[in-house]
Amino acid sequence: MLRVDKSLHRSLGLTDEEANVINEILGRQANPLELAMYSVMWSEHCSYKSSRLHLKRLPTEAPWVLVGPGENAGVVDVGDEIAVAIRIESHNHPSAIEPYQGAATGVGGILRDIFTMGARPIALMDPLRFGPLDDPRSQWIAEGVVSGVSGYGNAVGVPTVGGETVFDSTYKENPLVNVLCLGILPTDRLVLGQASGIGNLAVLLGNSTGRDGIGGVSVLASAGFSEEDDSAKRPSVQVGDPYEEKRLIEACLALLDEKLVIGIQDLGGAGLTCATSETASRGGVGMDVDISAIPCRELGMEPYEIMTSESQERMLAIVEPKNLKRVLEISNQWEVQASVIGKVTNGDSLRILSEAEGEVLADIPASSLHDDAPLYDRPKKKPELHQGLSGDELNPPVNVTNDLLNLLCDPSWVYKQYDHQLFLNTVVGPGDDATVLRLKHPVNGKETGRGLAITTDGNHRWCLVNPKIGTAMIVAEAVLNLACVGARPLAVVNCLNFGNPEHPEVMWQLSEAIDGMSDACVSFGVPVIGGNVSLYNESEGNNIAPTPVIGMLGLIDDLENRPPGAQMAEGDRLLLIGPETSGLGGSLWAANHGAIYGELPELDLEMHLKVAETIRTLVGTKLIRGVHDLSEGGLGVALAEMAAKSSVGVSIARTPNHQALFGEGPSRAVVAVDPESLTDVLTLCEERGVPVVRLGLATGNQFKIKDMMDVSLSDLKAAFINKLPNTFGVGTSNQ
Amino acid sequence: MDVAEAVSSLGASSKLLWHGDENIHGVDSIVIPGGFAHGDYLRPGAIARFSPVMKAVTQFALEGGPVVGICNGFQVLTEAGLLPGALQKNRGLKFVCEPATLRVETTESILTNKAAVGGNLHIPINHFEGNYTCNKETLKELQEENRIVLRYVNNPNGSIDDIAGVCNKNRNVVGLMPHPERACNELLGSTDGQVLFQSLLAA
């Protein structure tokens, strides 16, 4: 038995068993630098050691998939010699500690994942989840996170075109900050993060390496929060510099355009350790790294600090010696620092040297940092039957009007702080069912006449009630959101935000959610091309409600006109398209009344596809004036949002009870139809075998539901628009 | 790049000038676009105004050449002293990206010679430091000399006298915070920016 220095490996987050395995791999006792390198690479964040086993069950293939999970981003072919790279990631833990920088560097990191693939980042989305709106600390986190996304995203020059904003007590102390980025590239520019060619050079581009973000992935993102030690984690949060990133993007894309690099990899979680070992092991080669050649921000940095620092805005490029001169010229033009820090070697060893040909400080089989990372089949256990109230057991509302107004929340306070129009692509921006971007060729700017659509969706209430069906419902909702802008789905990326995997209930939730996602994606024929798992989202021993978030990319084959959006006009007929469903389990209304358990409404995947296809056809044929899918808050919220956005009241005849108003059954959308098109729309639904109900009409200045409510449009709009400004301050005087 | 696309959609050609270049390569008019030059570090436009290319731009402007600064470009022009006043943080102390309605106040400028006085234009804004300010004397001068080119119909950022854009005494240098290049395509929601670029191309 090899001796293990218990205090060191444990303080680095490695278990005794993991430390023993490391010593067995090396055939000797690992030194402190080596232990530090293993600790970051074998962290939950980098190794997916608790989730890898389950992620294998997701469908990942389709003829249009060019790159699936495992690379820096997924890539799909969208025709016209254009490919789309997409990825979603979490920056939950850093944002809980330091909201502005946590969110800002989340944006920076996801951008690098995209341009690493040779793609120009053209859009960001940010699904955000915070604690309750009336909690001052959650307000502080929310303001900081939104400012961080705004500050970094706007300055780096990539528009933030959508996302989500959710407030719920489950995220108190542990907010979820997920960031998605989408980029486009000419299909022939696709590059992978791998090294090859013995003697080729490893060139570090961008920022100097500092003491920020040391051990971010292992210290921060792979453990929960507790009361006493959180401020001590602040040095583990990185600091962002968007102007450096902007120049780095341009320099890297220029290098790729001239085909000057063999492989390129961004430095994110686990910093240089990850970038050097991943490029080497993917290419089946070794690498010598000269630690003295790495530009450092301060004197006296220890090798372990340099190798695990998560300083931002850095990239590692593998370059043939004959191209080095040109690489340095391009870097110089963009004022990006470039240094040769190592070279590709024969064999499998990642060696860290004190100087070129100097003392060997670490010598590790590069692939062991990835391939030999622990893989855990952690115990799973279905939670005990929930003792809490079901939404269906609640009494009917005392004041249904107030209940509805309380559910409304216009997120524009958030997205007005984001540049969402740069690059002149944004046809439908944030705030609608899905975002629509013009699809132009990334190099020659040629228009294709087609569009990309993108949506992010998550719903922790559904997933708490039933993680499997709840996750399938999220995928279904994304498909319907895309249909509402006329798009068909192409690919999914996921961000799985869960609690502590060492709790069997959490592992059960994760496993169920993956099964639900898999079922739905298989049914809809949509591959999962990448993702991120964020575990240990807990605070003081309480796990967050399971929160899988997905980003779904879609394609609009003919983008001649702007999609209708949630509009309606005086005299329009309002129809509810989709199956009748019942039940308040997992609904927002029930949660607001303290009932978070129960049963989810039924999801019929086949019917869902029919509904989505019908809606997509209706949008494409311009038979409808407006459309809005039913989601949080059900029919009531969908109608109220349509009324608020188009400044027209409604008169609804048929709504039997509050279940029908607030239930969140899937596969449904409201459409507004000009009376002249009504017959055509009804006929089309009948032909497709899709149920349709006539709700009433759009008219006047009152929001009226027969025998249930009658509220003025101005009160309704005020409730919708003012919720966030009343909490955070207006931000703009143009309300 | 966005401005180049908008201009080319009107049938004109454009070229990009590099900030380190000391030459403007014989162009007919110059647009300094928006976009966080030098990260807006220190203060928007405060570093960019020392870019080598700004010497040539200043020379061009003093010789009567048409120069437009959009958003960050407006900030650069005020920092460079080619336009009066300054842009400070928005009244709400937040970045604001939203549609704005502008009123054309004069057609006597290189950016509005083809527009109609009193006409409303729907053009988005996108800035943190767009709150135009100047001293009383300057404001009086701008008003009396009819140099306020565009005003906000609903002031979104606290700008003095609702100012969205101003010009210099010679009326050949115009700065505005809104982004006309974002309003040149029906698919993107508005084509009201076209008339401004058409004016510039005719200047």
Image: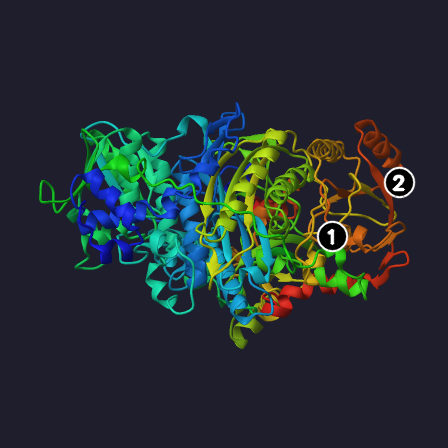
Pointer 1: what residue?
Answer: A584
Q: Amino acid at mark 2?
A: Pro
Name the foreground residue: A31 vs A478: A31
Outermost residue to the top: A63
Instruction: Nearest to the eye among marks 1 and 2: give it.
Output: 1
Q: Residue at x 36, y 51 (%)?
A: A217
Residue depicted at x 68% and y 35%: A486
Disc 1 crowd rating (10 Å Cα; few below 14, some 14-19, many 20+) is: many
Residue A347 place in picture, x, y as percent:
19, 29
**Circle 2 is placed at which residue position?**
A675
Q: Chain of mark 1?
A: A
Q: Residue furthest left?
A: A358
Amino acid identity at mark 1: Leu
User: Which image quarter holds the N terminus of chain A?
Assistant: top left
Left or right of B170? Residue A3 is left
| Above or below: residue A406 compared with residue A123 | below
Secondary structure type for disc 1: loop
Count residues near mark 2 (Cα–Cα under 10 Å), then give few for <14, some for 14-19, many for 20+.
some
**Disc number at residue A424?**
none
Mark 1 and mark 2 on one chain:
yes
Q: Nearer the viewer, residue B80 or A333?
A: A333
* Place of residue A365 in the rendered image (x, y in percent of width and height, measured from the top left): 22, 36
Is A181 or A234 nearer to us in this picture?
A: A234
In percent of width and height, residue A62 lies at: 53, 25
Q: Camera-side residue: A22 or A309?
A: A22
Q: CA distance from mark 1 to mark 2?
A: 33 Å
